[in-house]
Amino acid sequence: MRTRVRDRAGGSATSGASALTGTTRLLALAARRDRILLPVWVVALALVVLASVAAIAGLYGTEVERVQYAVAVAPSVIARAFEGPIFGTSLGAILMTETFGMLAVLVGIMSAQAVVRHTRLEEERGRAELVGATVVGRHAPLSAALLLAAVANVAVGAATSLVMLAYGLPAAGALLAGGLLAGVGASFAGVAAITAQLAASARGANGLAGAAIGLAYLLRSVGDALGEVAAGGTAVTSAWPSWLSPIGWGQQGRAFADERFWVLVLFAAACALTVGIAFALTRHRDVGSGLRPDRAGTARASRALRSPLGLAWRLHRGSVLAWSSGLVVAGAVFGAIGEEVDAFLETSEELVALFAQLGDSAELVDLFIVFLMGLLAVAVGAFAVQGVLRLQGEEASGRAEPLLATAVARRHWMASHLTVVAVASLAMLLAAGLAGGAAYGLATGQWGGRFADWVTAAVVTLPAVLALGALTVTAVGLLPRWSVAIGWGAVAVSLVLGQLGALLDLPQWVLNVSPFTHVPAVPSEELRWLPLLILLAVAVGLSAAGLVAFRRRDLRT
């Protein structure tokens, strides 16, 4: 006779399969809740692959141009650290060098957030406890989240392979590229499963997972920078640190070169190890708490925390510091490679023509600054969206209601968060520009006006960043249930249209959808104030509409 046991989640289940009881239904529920967000991720990543394949096929259409590219990139330590190793002169090999690192980071973020969203966040908002009171096994929620992440990663990998096959790239390389990308995502899903057990909050779990992704990228970067150029000068042998990173494994799979399908075994082993550790950790903690205990706060709040603005800064402080650190490092790397921009761009006449669309300057360095600062501006826009969505998170978790039940007015509470986001966005752009200008000056010895160009190119994008955040404010006020999809969808659209639209040769009216399209291309052209003032007016109008809508609706809990 089969006995029934009570697991620590509060639900009863049959012994034997009790730990996984209810996984199928929880998977269906998670898929229902992510029916918009995850497809947006998959489509956006597929569009990035599509844009990249189309661009590289146009820029390096001949074997001579591809050899010139490989000869320029392989010996460059900075290029290897930033982009990754190159393993040949085929179109597919160049595609993997140019895009795989960025795609790996994005799919890692997608996977980690999906796992944390359906595990730690559910506990934080009290829904996991209600589900656990039914016939649900201890490992069912985590299993459902991991399965959902696996499905999303398979979809991304399949879409990547299909796009590459549609462009006539070799089937073996296309299939391996998709498998490697899915493997990277699955690996970071396993990492997020562990961080969800360690952290005391969903925000902390996402932060730890993000740190793991950053560390993996850093290890890959160091390993490739320390690598050796093979005979012929068109391939690189990476050093051992690359093999400590899932992102490095993906690149060492060498899709479209001498394919190493056995690298996929590393991803399977990593997933088995991390998932096993996560399951073991679930047996040693209570629902709603993390294995890493919260630090005890002071008995009395500081004077700064006695105002809505001080509290808002305290809530956003960790995110601001993390984003700022990454942007400063990226700005410094961009500035350091500025000395090599002429040699790099001249590997292809089409590449020079493409950059020429960014402005009127005859100097390639000016166009290079415009393009790279535009990419960093989209990253700051992502921070702004994340910061605004913190309002929705505070509301959904129930923390906003007791605060607003005091003398704090809704407009003051909301304005405090928006002020922190706006000021932090300006500070991040300024820091990235200063880091880029300083690194360029150290690398080339050119300071003066060129240093100011880097700073101006970064700061001038602030109105577009604020417009992106303001759209999210309107979504939080009018459509809170859709605010996450709207905010991150706007970031994806801005990236694809504002930075990659020229590669796709899209019509101007489509490019105009992105606020970054309207930013003057300083320093390649003169600073024009009218478009900036219009963007600021749009940002103010959207923010005001969101504030009014928020004041007139009920709070969500």
Image: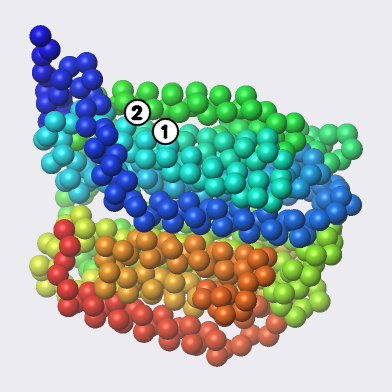
**Quadrant housing the C terminus:** bottom left
Q: Which residue appears at 78% of the width and 63% of the height?
A: 351
Mark 2 highlights which residue?
278
The percent coordinates of residue 417 (x first, y second) are 31, 68
Q: Quadrant of residue 357?
A: bottom right
The percent coordinates of residue 435 (x first, y second) are 62, 61
The residue lying toward the viewer, choosing from 62 and 319, is 62
Mark 1 highlights which residue?
190
Q: In which quarter of the image is residue 138?
A: top left
Q: Which residue appears at 27% of the width and 62% of the height?
A: 481
Q: What residue type is labelled 1?
A: Gly
**Quadrant housing the N terminus:** top left
Badge 2 density bin: few <14, some 14–19, many ≥20, Cα 10 Å: many
Decide if residue 395 is on the left or right side of residue 332. left
Q: Which residue appears at 15% of the width and 20% of the height?
A: 14
Q: Which residue appears at 51% of the width and 57% of the height?
A: 44
